[in-house]
Image (spheres, rainbow, N blue to C red):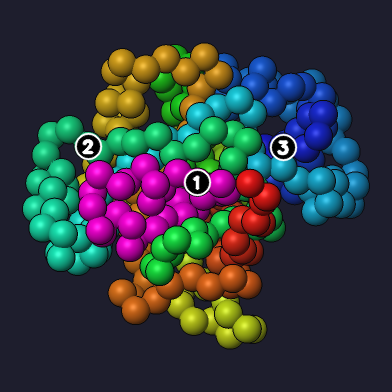
Amino acid sequence: MKLFSLPGGAILQHGSAFYQLDMEWDELVNRANLYKFLVGFIGRKQPIAAEAAAGAIDTLLLAPIGQQEVWAAGVTYLRSREARMEESANSGAADLYDKVYAAERPELFFKSLPHRVAGHNQQVYIRRDSIWNVPEPEMTLFINSEGDIQGYTVGNDLSSRSIEGENALYLPQAKIFERSAALGPCLFIPEESPDPQTAIKMSIERGGKVVYADETAIGRMKRSFTELTHYLFRECDFPHGCFLMTGTCLVPPNDFTLQEGDIVSITIDQIGTLVNHIAYKPMTKK
């Protein structure tokens, strides 16, 4: 099942049928056994016209987030470890990433407040003070306030590799800035956890041509979703639940950096495709 967030409510897709839910997003998603609740809802309601549902999703779609914070995990894939070690070689911090990949405790960091999160077909920003900006495609968990994984979405964790590579202590500046996170297009609520062979794909288009494309499987991640969730909830409370990006598995070549006007498409099997347009944050008067 897929939940699409719209102004004033949500649309639930189950197979080829669509249902209107006139509930506030946080109240809707932050519950125990969200899948069971939605199955019960379908049993009591009549579907709405597919054409009307598709039109509303096309024109009114929001990022599938309410008051939730967005957190992220780092160096959970071997390819990510290699990339972090390469970018930080000159700063002498390469060993940090090698050690955290093998450590018992994962790397977890705060990524975004909801008002900085972009949705499907919206702009995301790259930093003007960075010479090396990249998208990071990530399977993203929705975890309820009790610490239980209830759904999944596609995440784009925009990052400055030049800033983090200069000094590992600059991680917050490399990761946290306006519209540096995107989620969408929906919240996917399956009966069972995604198969390890679930594919995650990313392509980047520039001037009408694809300049990067690759894919892998989420099963190549070193850590489990439940392990990451356990560490995140050890000493933090999330009254509305939270989102957790689980790490990037696709890294463009070291000579690649995003440019204004690029289009990034990230697809995860069963969930869908998140498309974002690359821009700079508009200049403001000081």
Q: Which mark is residue 71?
A: none
Q: Decide if residue 217 is on the left or right side of residue 3.
A: left
Q: Residue at x 48, y 66 (%)?
A: 202
Residue 40 in percent (x, y) is at 68, 21
| Earlier sequence position, callout 2 versus callout 3 | 3
What type is the residue that disc 1 sits on?
Phe
Element type where label 3 sits in the image: strand
Q: Nearer the viewer, mark 3 or mark 1?
A: 1
Residue 125 in percent (x, y) is at 57, 57
To which residue does mark 3 refer?
Answer: 5
Which quarter of the figure has residue 73? top left
Residue situated furthest front in the rendering: 286
Which quarter of the figure has residue 35? top right
Residue in front for this viewpoint, 153 or 251: 251
Q: Nearer the viewer, mark 2 or mark 3?
A: 2
Q: Residues within 10 Å of mark 1 (few under 14, many from 20)?
A: some
Looking at the image, how many numbered discs can be counted on the residues? 3
Q: Decide if residue 71 is on the left or right side of residue 65.
A: left
Element type where label 2 sits in the image: loop
To which residue does mark 1 refer?
Answer: 177
Q: Residue at x 81, y 34 (%)?
A: 7
Question: Disc 2 to disc 3, how far (Cα)?
Answer: 31 Å
What type is the residue that disc 3 sits on?
Ser
Q: Which residues are magenta?
A: 154-183
Q: Are marks 3 and 1 in contact (CB under 8 Å)?
A: no
Q: Residue at x 10, y 46 (%)?
A: 99
Question: Disc 1 to disc 2, how far (Cα)?
Answer: 23 Å
Q: Residues within 10 Å of mark 2 (few under 14, many from 20)?
A: some
Q: Residue at x 27, y 31 (%)?
A: 227
To which residue does mark 2 refer?
Answer: 106
Which quarter of the figure has residue 45? top right
